[in-house]
Amino acid sequence: MHAQALLWLELGGLILGLALLARLAVAWRLSPIPFYLLGGLAVGEGGLIPLVPSQDFVEIGADLGVILLLLLLGLEFTAVELRRALRSGATAGLLDLALNYTPGVVAGLLLGLGWAPALFLGGVTYISSSGVVAKLLADLGWTANRETPLVLSILVFEDLAMAILLPLLAVVALGGSPLGAILAVGAALALVALILAVAARFGEGAGRLVFSGSDEVNLLTLVGVTLVVAGLTEQLNVSAAVGAFLVGIGISGEAAQSARTLLTPLRDLFAAVFFVFFGLSTDPAAIPGVLAPAAALAAASALTKVATGWWAARRAGVGRRGRVRAGAALVARGEFSVVIAGLGAAAGGAQELAPLAAAYVLIMATLGPLAARAADLRPRGEGRRLQIRRLARRRQRSGRSAKQAPGGSAS
């Protein structure tokens, strides 16, 4: 078969396969991330149907998927919201970092991966999946709960921590000196502070200046600016993903809402390609050998996330059930764990890092929604008692309304 024809057939089949996997995830009310990873394992080297001509295209699409993921994440927050979240959630965020970065580093060292891969594995276990958590909050009707702002502030802290961790990890992976690592972190902090200051003062004005009334012009402008900034930050040895994240933060107001609407379908497509590529670049034969340590790491880091949410909610005076929900909501790991693992593998990390991270994310992306739904279940009999109380209150309100109505009895 002609190579060009085979390329289109493979790409078309891959995207149709992604659609089928996404349909299964929706039907089973789970995150599609583990399905995409399994799909990548199936079409990678040693899989059921190895891709040949389209691997280069998939790799470029995967890089673009990471950039769009971080861009959309930055668009979710304004600079003012980020600064407010940092002030209110700094203590919980630091506890989250200490409790959930440590298990990955310790596990990496115990498994003999070495310091650099162990630091990347710490990033894998640290950061919750913003996408999975946000969907869970909406699906379970938790958005108005008292603990939800605490959960969101922890997620924001994690996302900003990424802007510092990624350049630091890149320097470590490349074997840079301690001074180089310090300079990289300093540059990242200065860049984040500059973007936050400029976005807070000029964000809406810049959005109005860049965006026009044409969706076509807006899409081309935003993607072009993001790719240019990503290239410049990559040239400065700061992750391209961080550059995309900062572009998103720099746009606020109506322009940010318009950008989210335009970019979300594009993000979903290339993010799915990214997860497939990560699975594709992982040897399926290596997965069984790391399942036991991945399961142990999943159990430990699930408990530390629950402890983080419980402590933050208790500190804010939230009740017992709200504390359980806060902890369970943070359990899921997903897109950013895979991003960090992919960067570690690309930077020459240990060969065991990619399969270990893939197995870990498969477990946690599935366990997270299940844990959240379990936290939402009420003890036996409580649901019935709640219904009785609601019915009693409804009757009481209707009785008061009848008394207050014209001609109602006062006795």
Image: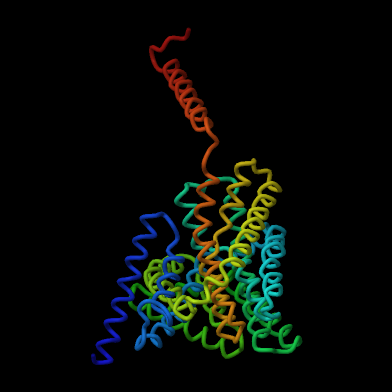
Q: Residue at x 38, y 75 (%)?
A: 212
Total numbered circles: 0
| In this picture, residue 337 sits left or right of residue 277 | right
Task: Name the spot of residue 130 as percent of width and height, x first.
Answer: 53, 63
Q: Nearer the viewer, residue 182 or 11?
A: 11
Which residue appears farthest toward the right when viewing the image? Answer: 179
Task: Name the spot of residue 340 as percent of width and height, x first.
Answer: 57, 75
Instruction: Note whether 377 is above or below 228 in the view shown.
Output: above
Instruction: Note whether 54 is above or below 370 in the view shown.
Output: below
User: In which image quadrant can residue 249 be found?
Assistant: bottom right
Task: Name the spot of residue 191 as percent of width and height, x first.
Answer: 63, 79
User: In which image quadrant can residue 170 be found?
Assistant: bottom right
Q: Residue at x 56, y 87 (%)?
A: 234
Q: Residue at x 63, y 62 (%)?
A: 296
User: In which image quadrant can residue 85 be found?
Assistant: bottom right
Instruction: Note whether 195 is above or below 261 in the view shown.
Output: below
Q: Nearer the viewer, residue 357 or 399?
A: 357
Indicate the quadrant containing the N terminus: top left, top right, bottom left or bottom right: bottom left
Which residue appears farthest toward the top when viewing the image? Answer: 411
Q: Nearer the viewer, residue 378 or 160?
A: 378
Describe the colour scheme in one phrase: rainbow
